[in-house]
Amino acid sequence: MKLQQQRNVDEVIGVQQQHKFKITDGSQAIIMDSLINLYSDPIGSIVREITSNCIDANRERVLKLDSKIPMETGDDTSYWSDKQTVCIEYVEKNTILGVDECIMFHDYGCGLSQERVQNVFTTFGASTKRDNNYEIGGFGLGAKSPLAYADTFYVSSRHNGTETYYMIYRNNDNVPHMDQVYQRATDDKNGSSVIVPIKDGYYDRRKFREAINEQLCFFKNLVYKNVEEALGEIKNYYTLQNRGKVIEDTEDYVLTNDGRNLFLLVGDVVYPINWDLLDDNESSYKASVGVRFDIGVLDLVPSREELRYTPTTISAIKTKLATLKAKFKADAAADYTMTDYVEYLIGISSLSSSGSSRYYSLESDCPKAIKASMANVGAYDIPFACNANLSPKKGYSSNAAFYQLFDGVSVFYAKRVSNNSAIGGETIYHKELNTWDEFFTHVKNHKHLYYVEGNFSTPKSYTITDEEDSFMAFKVDAAKRGARINDKTNFVDSRADYLKVSTFNTVSALLKKSSFVKSYADVEEKELSESYGDVLDSKTRRKVNKQVFARNAEIKSDGYNTEIKYTNQEYRISDLQDLLLSHGGADPNLKAVVYAETKNVDELNKVVKIISHNKQETTEVYRYGAQKFENHYRVVKVSKDVAKQFKDIEGFITAEEFMKSPTHLQSFMTAQKIKEYKSSFEFLESFGHRNSDISNHLCQLYKDIKNYDDNNGVDSCWRCDNQIEPIVKEILQLDIADEVRYDMKIINKLEEVVEYSQGLDLLNHVHFTNDSRKSVIDFLSLKDKTPDFEQVKQLILTA
């Protein structure tokens, strides 16, 4: 970058003494440290500065070959590469230098002689790029930028058959030094590499990835080696895999499709705009446009991290923005002069979000739309070249203009949709459009439309949607002129009859002859698939689809209370039967389908309360504050007719049958038995609770009981204790042996723990600390309950 050297004073009159500013030897370390730490974002600056230097190195080779800058002593073109790329490489371990993970920047320029390496890397302010604007650098600081991040970095130069490695570092005097550490002969073409060790593993790898994505997103001819594998996804507007892409690139501007705010590009480096310093408003330029400036036109701060908003820079930016805005506005007027009416409507639809002030820039793959957005030109600002009266109108009367223009022409958007009320579950959805905004929203996504005379045909529409996601159609019917306007709106068309007829004839003729409109009558009628069907009433549809209607039980909560609710659901009986079967030796997905008629809903509510105590049987749906039964049970309320269909099907049981079945009641009743006694042995929670490997017998019993209770004693129904007690009493009255009513493995453990806890209730009312083991042993000894020492060594007590 060519720097402007200014001479501010030509002559001073009457000078008596003159003193030239200087830097003392003792201050060198301080000044150098200040220059090194000039960067507010060290990693970002390394990525930007070193990559820019690599590009400059490649460019220097080309400029010399093109005789735009002179050759230097030592230049030997036989050693020069023809590569134009810059390679950024991640290395997990550099064996030559003995450095762990590092990031390397490789260029294929003329190479650096030893003298030039010394000049570039050991002299602050030294630059070879101040005499031209072909190259990016110029301040003589960027090559040293790695010192702002790391105390040591390395440079490798391949020059005329010799590869030399240098170590650049700061020692105890805080002054940078450079040592030659390795040299060898090489057959590689000339070039250089900068090797920067990565200091802080994952964190710094992430920062390097972010810096590459931010600083280099508009750099071309970059090659990455092992970078994405180690650092993560790299985003560049010129790569195919990146979502954001450059869709138009010129010497003056670049357009992207991702809706980023207006920005500046200097040598492919992105600079945001300080609108306050420009005394301008960002909302006037809402478009994803990068405004290009030649190197040297705008003033940069020495770190090159931002612009210097000098009068020259401000004037250059304002002039360029005004020029581009005027150009884009003129381009928009010239871009939509087509005579095909539907082509015109499709074209301006991409501008439907353009114009006026917006919070966000336009996201679009259409260069015309982005340019129009910056020029504040919208769909309503572009007249139809052949007849301006047929152009869309904006403002209060825009909908009225839509009705008048398409009077006698209904505009439809159609697509295939899922519909539970349709046989097969699919149908064709036709939506009539009544505003310009609706029309533009849909038409921009279609390359052609259809002209319909008469009614829609289901097989024809099905044929179209089998090949296209959706379609739009103009349904033309002269007999309906005026009907749609007067019947569906409060708008009364006051135009003279001859104008109404003339507009209808003109519009319908333009639509029919458009090359962007196909005849609906010519569409082949395809045979409908089984997934498609007409919309029927629910009862008929369920009969056809062999479904039944049921209401699923669920527990709803509002944060204060819970209640049992039933929500509508449709089932195929065969699907439920399949879930009840064992497949491949695995347990069935369903244990039972429990049902009841409305008259027996109280019995079904008991079932809900019992099953909900098992944590594995309910699914929490936080969005609706509901717990649903979607695991091993289906609990449903059904009609009398459905109950008849369920009867005698294996795995389908009534609520009354469930309430008499030990298979389904056992875990609930066992948890209720634990609840009856658990307050008497809660102190056992402290036995070994600091030891993750609880091996003693007593504590293991307690752990087994507690786990069982946690899984099967869940109080899903808040404040329902008074409702649970009658259910427990009812089950206890059943003629069922305790060996079947309860899980006896857990009951035996419970009995042993309860027996041990007799007389130890005092322990349930104290706090445990670290220095009372002897008191515990004495108390247990007094009660003749002393376990072995291992069992009580972690039990700590304070009254």
Image (tube, rainbow, N blue to C red):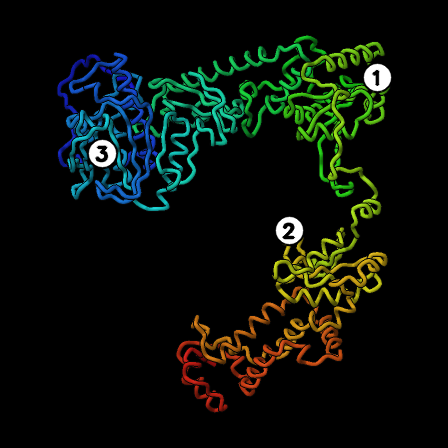
Q: Earlier in the sequence, mark 3 or mark 2?
A: 3
> Where does residue 470 sit, x and y in percent of width and height?
68, 29
The residue indicated by pointer 1 is 478
Q: Kindly identify the residue that appears in the image at 46 percent across and 90 percent down.
A: 781
> Label 2, label 1: how many angstroms apart (C-alpha)?
50 Å
Residue 335 visible here: yes
Q: Residues within 10 Å of mark 2 (few under 14, many from 20)?
A: few
Q: Residue furthest front?
A: 584
Q: Residues within 10 Å of mark 1 (few under 14, many from 20)?
A: some
Give the position of the N terminus as an image quadrant: top left
What kind of element bears circle 2?
helix
User: Looking at the picture, does residue 235 appear above or below residue 220?
Assistant: below
Residue at the spot of label 3: 155
Q: Which residue is mark 2?
A: 623
Look at label 1 and name its amino acid: Ala
Q: Which residue occupies the extreme top position in the image?
A: 386
Q: Identify the amino acid type marked 2.
A: Arg
Q: For this rendering, which residue is in front, 548 or 42?
A: 548
Q: Earlier in the sequence, mark 1 or mark 3?
A: 3
- Left or right placement of residue 399 versus residue 308 in this view: right
| Residue 280 shows in the view | no
Disc 3 residue type? Val
Dot 3: element: strand
Q: Depth check: 778 or 308 in front?
A: 778
Q: Nearer the viewer, mark 2 or mark 1?
A: 1
